[in-house]
Amino acid sequence: MMEEWLDIVDEEGNPTGKTVERSAAHREGIRHRTAHVWLARIREGRPQLLLQKRSRDKDSHPGCFDMSSGGHIPAGVEYLPSAIRELQEELGVTAREEELIDCGVRRFFRKERFHGAPFLDCQVSRVYLLWKDPEEFHLQEEEVEEVRWIDYDDCIRAVRENHFPHCIAMEELKILEGAVRAGRPEA
């Protein structure tokens, strides 16, 4: 498999003009960009989020529940096209850029170990909400094991109390809160 090249970015997520291989970015803790998309729907009057369970072969957080879709942004590409591409690749979900609600940016640095090796994750992530309830999903097996819907409030509680294996940040759920509580925009 060919190595993925990423833009090295400043604290605001602006490309610096330099690039780095994805593996080097995580080995050395070099700041890069990702796009995170959360699918939402309303069921019985309550907002729900779609969680994906990461494949057990993933280089980070294998077998953990995570946001609906997300991924690294290749060098020279912007947030929205990457978000749309990841939705299609990972879940088989088609969306238009204007359907994604920009909820904000999350910046973080995590130092962890996976598969016996250090994993340094320094990201600037743009977080999107997409009100969509597809009839079916086409999961990318090497990325996603399964998906499941969960009430937003139950998700907050489960993450806070660590009820299931996950890599969901409470900070990211809070970034979504305004858009989730506002409900689905009128079509």
Image (cartoon, helix red, strand yellow):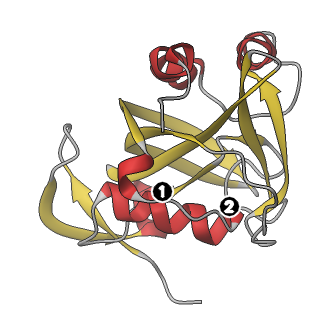
Count the marks. 2
The quarter of the picture where residue 15 lies is bottom left
What is the residue that sits farthest to the front in this orientation?
187
Disc 2 marks which residue? 59
Q: Is residue 130 above or below residue 57?
A: above
Residue under the image location 51 percent in, 35 percent down = 110
**Residue 150 place in picture, x, y as percent:** 81, 28
Q: Secondary structure at mark 2?
A: loop
Horizontally, is 21 left or right of 42 in the view?
left
Q: Type of residue at label 2?
A: Asp
Any part of residue 157 in sight:
yes
Any part of residue 72 in sight:
no
**Residue 38 place in picture, x, y as percent:** 59, 40
Horizontally, is 51 left or right of 148 in the view?
left
Classify 10 Å Cα crowding around label 2: few (below 14), some (14-19), many (20 and above).
some
Q: Secondary structure at mark 1?
A: helix
What is the residue that sits farthest to the left in this orientation?
17
First in sequence: mark 2 or mark 1? 1
Disc 1 marks which residue? 26
Q: Is residue 16 above or below residue 166?
A: below
Horizontally, is 49 left or right of 129 in the view?
right
Q: Type of residue at label 1?
A: His
Q: Alpha-carbon distance for marks 2 and 1?
A: 10 Å
Q: Is residue 9 above or below residue 111?
A: below
Which of the two residues, 17 or 100, is positioned nearer the viewer here?
100
Horizontally, is 137 left or right of 80 in the view?
right
Q: Is residue 126 above or below residue 54?
A: above
**Residue 103 place in picture, x, y as percent:** 39, 29
Residue under the image location 70 percent in, 14 percent down = 156
Residue under the image location 73 percent in, 53 percent down = 134
**Do residues under tags 2 and 1 come within 8 Å of each other at their CB atoms?**
yes
Residue under the image location 29 percent in, 71 percent down = 75
